[in-house]
Image: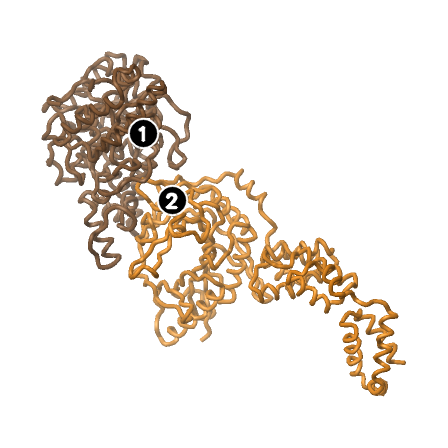
Chain colours: A orange, B brown
């Protein structure tokens, strides 16, 4: 039987506020345990939460970007359960009335574009961390992360496989960074997702029983966990079994998911409106203000790159996948001119991307600035250097040897464009290789590249390739 | 001097007839002498109090004293006060030293008042007799066989026995007004949101409100001037212009329209209380007030509604007492779940557990709509009753409690009968209105009777005026129990 995979994702994006969602403590990552937990975060007797307006603004920004409805009144609710790193015994979240409802995101899988509907996005606070190592059989509690603001973005079950799930997660990951509402740092847990996975016979409408896989903090884990889970479910059903609704964990070491708790063991969270926080009112004026701050979104940028720079859809996709890459690219183009955008794109997507990947660097930390890459492209365009030499210069810039002009001067890499000089070199090579000349003239065309190679060797690659080509052809023809 | 008003005490201090240290010391001596029997205080720390008194004396010497500078005020043990043990009447917080000041405490400190100690209370403010306190029952100074009421029973008894010039209380369903009535003192629960709840240990967040308890309406007005005000740390605090609650005290009452809800004078009201209240109303007529009968038709719903909503909020508010970070933790346990269970089983008393269970139940999946949501709807109806009533009158009056103080132990095994003693006070919290109680005489058993005055939203100054004018014409508020 053929199976259809149905996936819905719940993404937790940590909002990039300086202070926590309900207290004034800092949100910075990596401080010593419990040094960024104030009385409110510790849930001391008598403390009260106060909503951080910055978190609301970021949620609205997201809602506007995905074309969602911004609820003018939304309600914070308490989600009650006991856990040592949940100081109040409840998490403040939103239940019946979230701040953002509806909306959608377009994703691209291969050549196919697909729209994924967003169910809702709501504000909530994060819990602390339980540390099970280094405490000799006891558990340490670090509440630095407690009350960090999160936007939980819930999709409809519109995703039809791991590739779509990953594409959706990546698109969302890019979007929240574009909007500057989340730093997207997955290693630090700023962007993580839960996947609801089920399968059903192809062509049927009824959803299968789903399992929720918790806390996937990399795209690769998302992909692997979904694939494992899909295979597991199909195997069970094909063997005549039934899927039990449950929460599962993905173990990346063993590359498998395993049961965390069954539906019967699921908590009754006893949601009710938090009486410490009044319903959150959002004014038209606030929405209008935030609208003004919306940056150009990836889709619009994609279209503009194709239109203004004549790039292919693929090139535009790669260059708009992250806000910082797009910004870098545009800075290069602004210096070399739109006519050279394709050359700039090739450099950003080729040598630069390769070097960044090789050295595990983010583009923000690229040793070659956009100004320097632009200087290199300019020298190619004005024929000062060949593309081949340019690669050598790029590497030198990467090593911090200065800008393109300085390196060209220091290493004497200026292209030879003097026809007389090139002709002289060709004459010398022809004179030194009479046998090859004879063979070429008797019809062995392939030997042309031999002569090119000799000429490049003699000029250390600096001869203008086009000129060399033309002159050599002429001379060889006699 | 123990019968002096706050104004008189402030004048004595300003005139250097007495220092704050001497005043504080004299009350500390009274506490030392009388508290072992009354048990109105959970924590007294003479050294801390006297340090504050010395600081106040410096301010007074520099001529920088205000209305409360140097005046000792007893604090209900529900307010966190930095460096003070703050127990909320519970074993759960029996060892908890508050590392910060509640907003109310901050305000008293800023006014130069002296924290005289932390008063006894029902555990987590859950009770109407002060008998649920882990730190033992409090005796009513008027009759030591009687309860002082609750949950602010320690504060009420301390003011009644003149162990302090004034005290603070909190009122979730009557916890300021009921003990004020049963001990013959004056207390006011302001409009919800007037006094910050920051640092006031939560019982039922949507109902809890702090307020003053003192000998007179005038004293309460001065105390409220210090306690009230916007606090950005409490999202339910109301950002309103600062008020002088004493501004209207001297206004005559001619033309005042008093609404008497017929439901408050119906079955269940003891005849001695009814007679005393009627006498008080007659006094108001003499002062020029008119009386209109009104109806609060949903009064009978207020107790069931309250006993769904308050426990629901409490079950969640008290989840933080889990033995993990502070407070009591069971000495022995097998694992995490066992630690939770034993800590909470040992740390909470029976009434608290009862309310946590009720609250957990009414919020559970499948019951939420039938209980919690329904109660929220009825809460709005109850509030609407008052809105309608205030179209007909300026203030509402009636008994604060159906009977005078009952005996210690009389109702402690009968929670429903205990809950019913708050029948006249609870609706005020559900509506978020201000309410107060003033002493207006004594019942057949010589125990005090309280008159409840309910005002419209933010009508505290009016209510204090109404109470003050009565206290100018009568002396019930100056009566003292014998043997103190």
Depth check, front residue: A132 or B466 = A132
- Work out whether residue B465 can be spotted: yes
Circle number at residue B469: none
The structure residue drawn at horizontal position 20% and vertical position 21%, both measured from the top left corner, is B439
Residue A49 x/y as whole percent: 38, 42
Depth check, front residue: A200 or B17 = B17
Q: Could you classify mark 2 by the number of other residues whose Cα lies within 10 Å: few (under 14), some (14-19), or many (20 or more)? A: some
Please, is residue A256 above or below residue B414 in the view? below
- Residue linked to disc 1: B433
SS for callout 1: loop
Q: Chain of mark 2?
A: A
User: Quarter of the image holding residue A230?
Assistant: bottom left
- Residue linked to disc 2: A38
User: Quarter of the image holding residue B288?
Assistant: top left
Q: Chain of mark 1?
A: B
Please, is residue A118 above or below residue B96 in the view? below
Residue found at the very far right of the displayed protein: A478
SS for callout 2: loop
A40 lies left or right of A473: left
- Work out whether residue B435 can be spotted: no
A458 lies left or right of B345: right
């Amino acid at each position: 039987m053929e199976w259809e995979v149905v996936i819905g994702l719940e993404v937790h994006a940590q909002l990039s506020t300086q202070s926590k969602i309900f207290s004034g403590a800092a949100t910075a990552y990596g401080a010593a345990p419990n040094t960024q937990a104030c009385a409110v975060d510790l849930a001391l007797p008598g403390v009260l939460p106060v909503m951080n307006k910055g978190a609301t603004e970021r949620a609205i920004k997201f809602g506007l970007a995905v074309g969602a409805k911004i609820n003018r009144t939304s309600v914070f609710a308490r989600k009650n359960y006991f856990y040592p790193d949940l100081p109040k015994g409840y998490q403040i979240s939103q239940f019946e009335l979230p701040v953002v409802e509806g909306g959608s995101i377009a994703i691209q899988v291969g050549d196919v574009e697909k729209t994924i509907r967003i169910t809702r996005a709501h504000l909530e606070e994060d819990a602390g961390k339980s540390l099970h190592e280094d405490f000799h059989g006891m558990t340490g509690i670090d509440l630095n992360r407690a009350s960090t603001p999160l936007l939980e973005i819930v999709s409809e079950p519109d995703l039809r496989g791991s590739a779509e799930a990953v594409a959706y997660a990546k698109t969302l990951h890019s979007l929240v960074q574009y909007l500057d509402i989340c730093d997207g740092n997955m290693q630090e847990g700023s962007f993580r997702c839960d996947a609801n996975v089920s399968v059903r016979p192809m062509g049927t409408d009824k959803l299968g029983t789903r399992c929720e896989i918790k806390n996937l903090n990399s795209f690769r884990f998302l992909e692997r966990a979904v694939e494992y889970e899909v295979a597991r479910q199909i195997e069970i059903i094909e063997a005549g079994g039934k899927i039990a609704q449950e929460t599962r964990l993905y173990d990346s070491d063993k590359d498998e998911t395993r049961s965390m708790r069954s539906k019967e063991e699921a908590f009754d969270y006893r949601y009710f409106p938090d009486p410490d926080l009044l319903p959150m009112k959002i004014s038209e004026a606030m929405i209008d203000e935030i609208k003004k701050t919306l940056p150009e979104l990836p889709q619009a940028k994609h279209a503009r790159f194709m239109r203004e720079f004549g790039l292919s859809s693929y090139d535009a996709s790669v260059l708009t996948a992250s806000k910082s890459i797009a910004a870098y690219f545009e800075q290069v183009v602004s210096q070399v001119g739109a006519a050279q955008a394709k050359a700039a794109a090739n450099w950003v997507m080729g040598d630069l991307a390769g070097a960044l990947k090789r050295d595990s660097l983010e583009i923000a930390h690229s040793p070659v600035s956009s100004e320097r890459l632009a200087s290199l492209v300019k020298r190619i365009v004005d024929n000062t250097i060949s593309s081949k030499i340019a690669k050598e210069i790029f590497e030198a810039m990467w090593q911090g040897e200065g800008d393109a002009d300085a390196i060209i001067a220091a290493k004497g890499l200026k292209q030879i464009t003097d026809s007389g000089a090139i002709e002289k070199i060709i004459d010398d090579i022809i004179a030194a290789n009479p046998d090859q000349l004879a063979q070429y003239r008797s019809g062995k065309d392939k030997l042309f590249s031999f002569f090119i190679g000799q000429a490049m060797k003699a000029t250390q690659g600096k001869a203008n390739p086009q000129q060399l080509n033309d002159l050599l052809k002429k001379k060889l023809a006699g | 001097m123990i019968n002096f008003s706050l104004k008189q005490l402030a004048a004595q201090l300003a005139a250097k007839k007495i220092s704050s240290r001497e005043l504080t010391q004299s009350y500390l001596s009274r506490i030392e002498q009388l508290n072992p029997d009354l048990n109105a205080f959970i924590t007294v720390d003479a050294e801390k109090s006297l340090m504050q008194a010395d600081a106040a004396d410096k301010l007074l010497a520099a001529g920088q004293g205000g209305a409360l500078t140097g005046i000792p005020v007893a604090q209900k043990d529900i307010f966190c006060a930095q460096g003070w043990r703050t127990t909320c009447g519970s074993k759960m917080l029996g060892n908890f030293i508050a590392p910060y000041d509640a907003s109310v405490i901050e305000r008293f400190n800023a006014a130069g008042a002296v924290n005289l100690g932390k008063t006894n209370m029902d555990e987590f403010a859950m009770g109407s007799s002060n008998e649920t306190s882990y730190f033992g029952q409090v005796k009513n100074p008027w009759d030591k066989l009687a309860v002082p009421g609750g949950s602010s029973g320690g504060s009420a008894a301390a003011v009644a026995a003149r162990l302090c010039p004034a005290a603070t209380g909190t009122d979730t369903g009557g916890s300021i007004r009921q003990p004020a009535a049963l001990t013959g003192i004056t207390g006011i629960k302001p409009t919800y949101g007037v006094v910050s709840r920051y640092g006031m240990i939560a019982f039922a967040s949507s109902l809890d409100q702090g307020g003053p308890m003192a000998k007179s309406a005038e004293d309460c007005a001065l105390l409220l001037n210090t306690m009230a005000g916007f606090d950005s740390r409490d999202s339910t605090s109301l950002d309103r212009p600062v008020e002088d609650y004493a501004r209207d005290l001297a206004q005559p009452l001619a033309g005042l329209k008093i609404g008497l809800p017929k439901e408050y004078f119906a079955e269940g009201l003891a005849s001695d209380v009814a007679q005393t209240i009627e006498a008080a109303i007659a006094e108001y007529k003499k002062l020029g007030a008119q009386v209109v009968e009104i109806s609060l038709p949903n009064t009978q719903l207020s107790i069931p509604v309250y006993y769904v909503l308050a426990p629901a909020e409490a079950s969640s508010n008290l989840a933080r007492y889990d033995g993990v970070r502070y407070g009591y933790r069971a000495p022995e346990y097998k694992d995490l779940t066992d630690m939770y269970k034993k800590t909470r089983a040992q740390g909470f008393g029976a009434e608290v557990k009862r309310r946590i269970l009720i609250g957990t139940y009414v919020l559970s999946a499948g019951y939420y709509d039938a209980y919690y949501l329904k109660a929220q709807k009825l809460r709005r109806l109850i509030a609407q009753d008052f809105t309608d009533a205030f179209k007909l009158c300026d203030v509402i009056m009636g008994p604060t409690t159906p009977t005078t103080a009952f005996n210690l132990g009389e109702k402690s095994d009968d929670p429903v009968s205990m809950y019913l003693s708050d029948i006249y006070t609870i609706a005020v919290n559900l509506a978020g209105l201000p309410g107060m109680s003033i002493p207006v005489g004594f019942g057949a058993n010589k125990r005090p009777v309280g008159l409840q005055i309910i005002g419209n939203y933010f009508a505290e100054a009016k209510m204090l005026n109404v109470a003050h004018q009565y206290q100018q014409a009568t002396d019930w508020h100056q009566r003292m129990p014998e043997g103190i």
